[in-house]
């Protein structure tokens, strides 16, 4: 338990997590305000539309998560940490837990904040969370942010450099997954199994209007919760690689 | 008690630490001496379990570092004062360290007081001068009130005031009965602080002995004499087989007799009835001792050192090896 406190102190005694959290919240709620304000007709506003900025928040949260570990390598505090607690796997798992929890909280605040802001801008709109899909769309954001944070911490642990790690997670989730579709014949099939696409499917599947209920790659192979499980398994695999490598590596 | 046995670390084709064995005894300051690139920092990191040795092992009180429970309570170390997040306050830096080893929160204020940083505890560590950062590093090392302390080049880059402070601090720690293992390439610094020495060059052990022994055995002692009858004395000394050279001084020329004691020179002078104005033994410095030893470690090994030679160290020249 004291290790959780250690990582909490470390994370929150620097400025970057606070800034990242603020930027993530500003971006998501800002987009929600923008989208709902530009709609002429309140009935056109859907729950899915309020979450337009969700992916921007996700990017910022992944940057925060990657920085949480890469700055430790950058400033050498990882050595002090391993000196104080030689069980490296325990250290990294605890750090991942703390970062993922914070990411999850940011995700929930961002999602419900966006939803609330939209309702304030368009009070006449029908934004009730009436279906399981709509609940996943809003409340599921925290789960996706938390798991994406695990991926980002793992990548940060492996790459150890802030710029490299951030570039990798952002380019991967924003660009590489979609570019896979350009591969002839099999591209679409591969894309359906891409982790961040799966994460998106968890939130967007089953939405009747506004969201991209239809995946650009066609029918998704898994249901929403299985997709989330797939994304979680992906995060676990990357994390396991990071743990094994860190255990063996000199710091 | 730190015990290294056959410690070896390679980086690609460079051997940073080569079959290094030594022990650091409790209750005294042991200097870890060698030029830059001799493998001191690498050895320190291996002691702390940060780097994995390619061969051999190093034990803290009989156990590998990674198996220590709450290691800050056993070993405190300052390897690099810059290993602090620049935007974190000094207090926050110590707080997470204390928490990690279940040390009470008041211990943070105690060590801040001890190193004289209480007044700036809330300031971000990135704004600290090198001397202040060094003090913060020492505060972190002392946090768990450990029996064993490791310092890697603690006076590097400090101003004279900082150097004096560190020097006195280390003596105080040793006086409290702790084991202090401090590395340096500054030989004069070691002469002032360390009782025992572990001397390395190019990753290999050159000597492990007391500082006094190191200087006595390794440096050639000489004697300086001044006399109004210098020529007679020189002839007598050369006749006895001593090597002599003339050294001009403010009081006229003096003779420096190599590899001699003041007893020998005084007796020769008396036998010749020569008047002496000065008869002073010249102590070799640690620098001289070091240069002499490292330029020909084979000779040293056979003459004075109890170090087990491996025969591979023929005519080592101390060229700083890369990292």
Image (spheres, grey):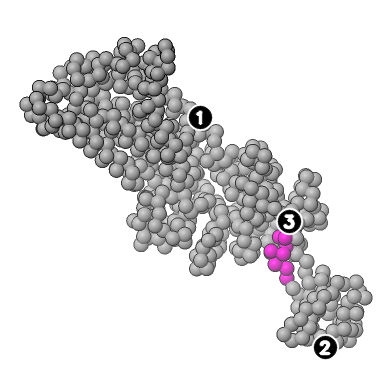
The answer to whether one can see residue A175 in this image is yes
Name the residue at the right extreme.
B239
Q: Which residue is mark 3?
A: B294
The answer to whether one can see residue B110 in this image is no
For residue A47, which quarter of the picture? top left
**Which dot marks residue A244?**
1
For residue B181, which quarter of the picture? bottom right
Residue A88 in the figure: left or right of residue A100:
right
Q: Secondary structure at mark 2?
A: loop
Mark 3 Cα shell of 10 Å, populated few (<14), some (14-19), many (≥20) = many
In the rendered image, the quadrant that contains the N terminus of chain A is top left
Magenta segment main secondary structure: helix
Magenta region includes residue B290: yes
Mark 2 Cα shell of 10 Å, populated few (<14), some (14-19), many (≥20) = some
Q: Are marks 2 and 1 on the same chain?
A: no
Q: Position of residue B164 (x, y in %)?
A: 53, 67
Q: In the rendered view, tell whether residue B311 sits above or below residue B109.
A: above
Q: Position of residue B62 (x, y in %)?
A: 60, 42
Q: Are marks 2 and 1 in contact (CB under 8 Å)?
A: no
Q: Return the chain for callout 3.
A: B
Q: Number of labelled discs?
A: 3
Q: Are marks 3 and 2 in contact (CB under 8 Å)?
A: no
Q: In the rendered view, tell whether residue B269 sits above or below residue A48.
A: below
Which stretch did the figure color magenta?
B283-291
**Labels 3 and 2: the sequence-earlier one:** 2
Q: Return the chain for callout 2.
A: B
Q: Secondary structure at mark 1?
A: helix
């Amino acid at each position: 338990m004291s290790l959780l406190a250690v990582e909490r102190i470390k994370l929150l005694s620097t400025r970057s997590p606070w800034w990242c959290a603020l930027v993530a919240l500003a971006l998501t709620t800002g987009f929600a305000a923008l989208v709902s304000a530009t709609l002429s007709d309140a009935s056109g506003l859907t729950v899915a539309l309020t979450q337009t900025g969700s992916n921007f928040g996700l990017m910022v949260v992944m940057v925060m998560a990657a920085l949480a570990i890469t700055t430790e390598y950058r400033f050498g505090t990882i050595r002090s940490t391993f000196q104080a607690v030689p069980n490296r796997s325990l250290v990294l798992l605890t750090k991942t837990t703390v970062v993922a929890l914070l990411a999850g909280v940011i995700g929930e605040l961002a999602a419900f904040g966006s939803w609330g802001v939209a309702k304030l801008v368009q009070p006449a709109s029908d934004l009730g969370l009436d279906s399981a899909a709509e609940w996943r769309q809003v409340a599921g954001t925290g789960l996706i942010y938390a798991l994406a944070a695990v991926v980002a911490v793992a990548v940060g642990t492996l790459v150890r450099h802030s710029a490299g790690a951030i570039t990798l997670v952002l380019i991967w989730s924003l660009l590489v997954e979609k570019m896979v579709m350009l591969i002839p014949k099999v591209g679409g099939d591969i894309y359906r199994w891409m982790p961040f696409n799966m994460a998106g499917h968890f939130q967007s599947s089953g939405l009747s209007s506004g969201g991209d209920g239809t995946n650009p790659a066609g029918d998704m192979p898994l249901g929403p919760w299985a997709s989330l499980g797939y994304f979680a398994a992906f995060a676990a695999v990357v994390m396991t690689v990071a743990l094994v490598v860190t255990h063996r590596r000199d710091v | 008690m730190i015990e290294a046995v056959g410690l070896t670390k390679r980086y690609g084709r460079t051997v940073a630490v080569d079959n290094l064995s030594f022990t650091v005894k409790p209750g005294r300051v042991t200097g870890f001496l060698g030029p830059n690139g001799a493998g001191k920092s690498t050895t320190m990191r291996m002691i702390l379990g940060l780097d994995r040795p390619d061969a051999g092992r190093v034990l803290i009180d009989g156990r590998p570092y990674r198996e220590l429970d709450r290691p800050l309570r056993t070993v405190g170390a300052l390897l690099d004062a810059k290993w602090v997040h620049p935007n974190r306050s000094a207090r926050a830096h110590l707080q997470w360290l204390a928490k990690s080893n279940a040390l009470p929160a008041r211990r943070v204020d105690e060590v801040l007081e001890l190193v004289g940083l209480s007044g700036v505890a809330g300031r971000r560590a990135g704004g600290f001068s090198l001397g202040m950062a060094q003090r913060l590093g020492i505060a972190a090392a002392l946090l768990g009130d450990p029996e064993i302390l490791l310092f890697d080049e603690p006076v590097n880059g400090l101003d004279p005031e900082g150097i004096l402070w560190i020097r006195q601090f280390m003596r105080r720690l040793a006086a409290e009965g702790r084991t202090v293992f401090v590395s340096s390439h500054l030989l004069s610094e070691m002469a002032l602080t360390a009782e025992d020495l572990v001397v390395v060059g190019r990753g290999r052990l050159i000597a492990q002995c007391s500082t006094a022994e190191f200087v006595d055995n390794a440096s050639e002692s000489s004697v300086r004499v001044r006399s109004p009858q210098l020529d007679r004395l020189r002839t007598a000394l050369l006749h006895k087989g001593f090597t002599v050279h003339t050294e001009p001084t403010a009081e006229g020329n003096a003779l420096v007799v190599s590899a001699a004691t003041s007893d020998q020179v005084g007796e020769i002078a008396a036998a010749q009835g020569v008047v002496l104005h000065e008869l002073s033994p010249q102590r070799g410095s640690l620098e001289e001792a070091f240069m002499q030893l490292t330029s020909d470690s084979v000779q040293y090994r056979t003459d004075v050192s109890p170090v087990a030679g491996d025969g591979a160290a023929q005519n080592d020249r101390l060229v700083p090896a890369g990292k």
